[in-house]
Image (cartoon, rainbow, N blue to C red):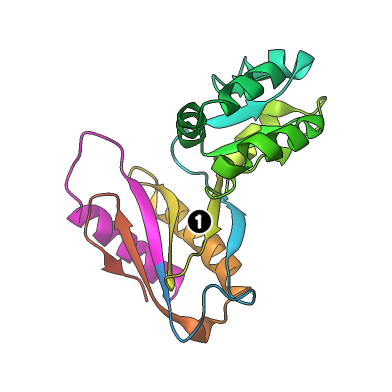
């Protein structure tokens, strides 16, 4: 399907979606055939930067001490130092709540062993183990990139759902994001193994792309 046809399908999905009291996400659902999604050959574990952005803000959690902790608190309300990491690790419910509040995490490299040991049981299954970041790194730049990066994680079922933007974004921009996501998937899973691709808003009907 060419880009013009995709844009028309995006417009159709937006037209058929009822107005809601919140800004709906736009996502694609990719269905596969004749493959074992748990095999190393086809298991998807991708991070894809959307060229036209996500369309809405998401929270990024930061594990940091010292100066990095001070700078981190200026750009995120989800920041923990070493003492707080240890404190939270004593309460799984508190850890889960913190983990669920953030889309992704970064951490000082020297804190990674501590996080892996005490938080791995919560962050690992969610695909949210932190990205190590040097203490002197440009946090604004790193976090801006993470906020516009989407995870593509396959499980047992032969399907993945990936957010590609929001309903108020330009259809051409959404089309660009879809193209990048599909390219990333097709680099690992051959096109002939893709059964179908659908597009929908959060609460809207699914529209078949191809």
Report the residue at 75% width, 28% height from top.
138
* Local crowd size for mark 1, using a 10 Å CA cut-off: few (<14), some (14–19), many (≥20): many
The percent position of residue 187, horizontal first and vertical second, equals: 63, 73
Q: Which residue is mark 1?
A: 177
Q: How many marks?
A: 1
Residue 182: x percent and y percent? 52, 67
Helix, strand or loop at label 1? It is: helix
Viewer-proximal residue among 36 and 180: 36
The answer to whether residue 39 shows anywhere in this view is yes
- The correct choice, above or below, for 142 with respect to 53 in the image is above
Q: Position of residue 143 (x, y in %)?
A: 63, 33
Q: Quadrant of the C terminus?
A: bottom left
| Depicted 127 relative to depicted 101: above or below | below
From the viewer's perspective, tell me whether residue 29 is left or right of residue 151.
left
95 displayed left or right of 63: left
Residue at horizontal 75%, vertical 36%? 112
User: Which quadrant of the view contains residue 23?
Assistant: top left
Task: Identify whether 12 is placed above or below 65.
Answer: below
Q: Position of residue 65 (x, y in %)?
A: 75, 18
Q: Considering the image in quadrants, where does the N terminus appear?
A: bottom left
* In the image, farthest residue toward the front: 90
Which residue is depicted at the point 61% across and 54% down?
47
Magenta region, residue range:
1-29
Residue 8 lies in the magenta-colored region:
yes
User: Is residue 172 highlighted in magenta?
Assistant: no
Q: Is residue 93 left or right of residue 199?
A: right
Q: Is residue 115 above or below residue 45?
A: above
Q: Is residue 142 visible?
A: no
Q: Is residue 117 left or right of residue 44?
A: right
Residue depicted at x 39% and y 45%: 169
């Amino acid at each position: 399907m060419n880009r013009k046809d995709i844009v028309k399908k995006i417009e159709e999905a937006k037209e058929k979606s009822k107005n809601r009291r919140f800004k709906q996400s736009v996502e694609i659902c990719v269905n596969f055939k004749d493959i074992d999604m748990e095999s190393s050959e086809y298991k998807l574990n991708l991070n894809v930067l959307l060229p036209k952005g996500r369309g809405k803000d998401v929270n990024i959690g930061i594990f940091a001490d010292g100066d990095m902790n001070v700078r981190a608190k200026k750009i995120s309300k989800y920041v923990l130092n070493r003492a707080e990491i240890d404190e939270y690790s004593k309460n799984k419910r508190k850890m889960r709540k913190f983990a669920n509040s953030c889309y992704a995490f970064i951490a000082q490299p020297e804190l990674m062993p501590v996080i892996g040991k005490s938080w791995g049981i919560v962050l690992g299954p969610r695909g949210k183990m932190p990205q190590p970041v040097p203490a002197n790194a440009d946090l604004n730049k790193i976090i801006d990139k993470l906020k516009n990066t989407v995870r593509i994680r396959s499980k047992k079922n032969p399907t993945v759902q990936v957010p590609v933007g929001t309903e108020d974004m330009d259809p051409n921009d959404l089309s660009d994001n879809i193209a990048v996501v599909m390219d990333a998937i097709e680099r690992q899973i051959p096109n002939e193994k893709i059964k179908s691709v659908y597009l929908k808003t959060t609460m809207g009907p699914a529209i078949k792309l191809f």
